Image (cartoon, grey):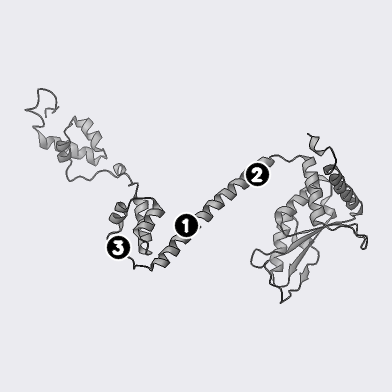
Amino acid sequence: MTEITPGRGASRNKYEDFEGLRERAVALRREGLSLRQIRDELKVFNNDILNRLVQGEPPPAWTKRPRAKDDLRERARELRTQGWTYDQIQVELGCSKSSISLWVRDLPRPERRDPSEQAKLAARKRWEHELAMRDVERQRVKDGARQEIGQLSDRELMMAGVALYWAEGTKDKEYARRETVTFVNSDPAVIRLYLAWLRLLGIAPERLRYRLMIHITADTEGAERYWADVVGVDVSTFQRTTIKKHNPKTVRKNVGENYRGCLVIRVKQGADLYRRIEGWWYGIVGAASAPDLQNRT
């Protein structure tokens, strides 16, 4: 067969062997070529003839592009079935009403709501959006502040630990002499920081005693396993748990599956350590209140 090449001066003989050309086009189509590839292969640059050559032959799967608005369409139909109006869907998805109408025209029209109810729904939607934006901003500030800390030096950890103990640990009183180092808290992050501070001070793990304090209605065994995992010891090393009885007249908020009581950490033979902690604390207080505080670098 003589190759048919469209070009100048060949208009009369152009595509004379149409059936032969079609056979080649169909074969190429079935091999998975696109229209453009078939055009370049056969040198057929007339779109009308090109489409006739492959008529009846489906395009290969790889040439089918996903429609950019398919996800929006499915979401619009979902919202429409929930009774949303065109205006609400437009605000939610940010697409035109004409597109929404085209996508959902086969669905039943939602019942008309009372105007006051409609206003309440719109107000609630705006408030939910406002709360979401506040959460984003809140997290942005937290992440920025976290990055400001960077690496923690031993001296910085030392100061943080002293302040943490003086806020949450037991303290000696004139009316109750108890020079013991005992720390109580329900926040695992606080517990981990406290233990890091004790390691900095050189307190051996063998000197630490752990005990759980928890309300009688809670899952005691589950809480013990949780805290043992936090501090990295076997639960069998825990001392006897202190059970707190619940006052029925008190409305407790520390309830639910996330309530695991408080962990008590005592340093054995800690009298000398306690005295040093108290000295460190008042040293910090004195340094912070010194007259030349503003001139420090």
How crowded pointer 3 is (Cα within 10 Å; few <14, some 14-19, many 20+) is rated as few
Residue 212, image x, y percentages: 76, 64
> Which badge, 3 or 1, comes first in the chain's sequence?
3
Give me the residue at 50% from left, 58% from top.
127
The total number of labels drawn is 3
Q: Nearer the viewer, mark 3 or mark 1?
A: 1
Within 10 Å of the Cα at label 2, are there few (<14), some (14-19), or many (20+) other Cα atoms? few
Left/right placement of residue 58 relative to residue 249 reads left
In 3D space, how far apart are the residues under numbered discs 2 and 1 (Cα atoms)?
29 Å
Label 3 and label 2: CA atoms lie apart by: 50 Å
- How far from the left and from the top, in percent, is residue 125? 46, 59
Which badge, 2 or 1, is on the more N-terminal residue? 1
Q: For the residues labelled 2 and 1, say whether their Cβ atoms are less than 8 Å apart.
A: no
Q: Nearer the viewer, residue 242 or 25?
A: 242
Which of the 4 image quadrants contains residue 290? top right
Mark 3 highlights which residue?
A: 107
Q: Residue furthest bottom?
A: 248
Closer to the eye: label 2 or 1: 1
Question: Callout 3, which amino acid?
Answer: Leu
Task: Measuring from the top left, give residue 140's x and y in whole percent.
Answer: 58, 46
Q: Would residue 22 appear left or right of 181 to someone viewing this image?
A: left
140 displayed left or right of 185: left
Residue 75 in view of the camera? no
Q: Residue furthest left?
A: 12
Q: Which residue is mark 2?
A: 145
- Residue type at mark 1 is Arg
State yes or no: discs 3 and 2 in contact (Cβ < 8 Å): no
Q: Which residue is mark 1?
A: 126
Determine crowd level at label 1: few under 14, some 14-19, many 20+ residues with C-alpha closer than 10 A: few
Q: Give the left or right position of residue 47, taking residue 254 as reference.
A: left
Q: State the CA–CA distance, disc 3 to disc 1.
A: 26 Å
On-image quarter of the C terminus: top right
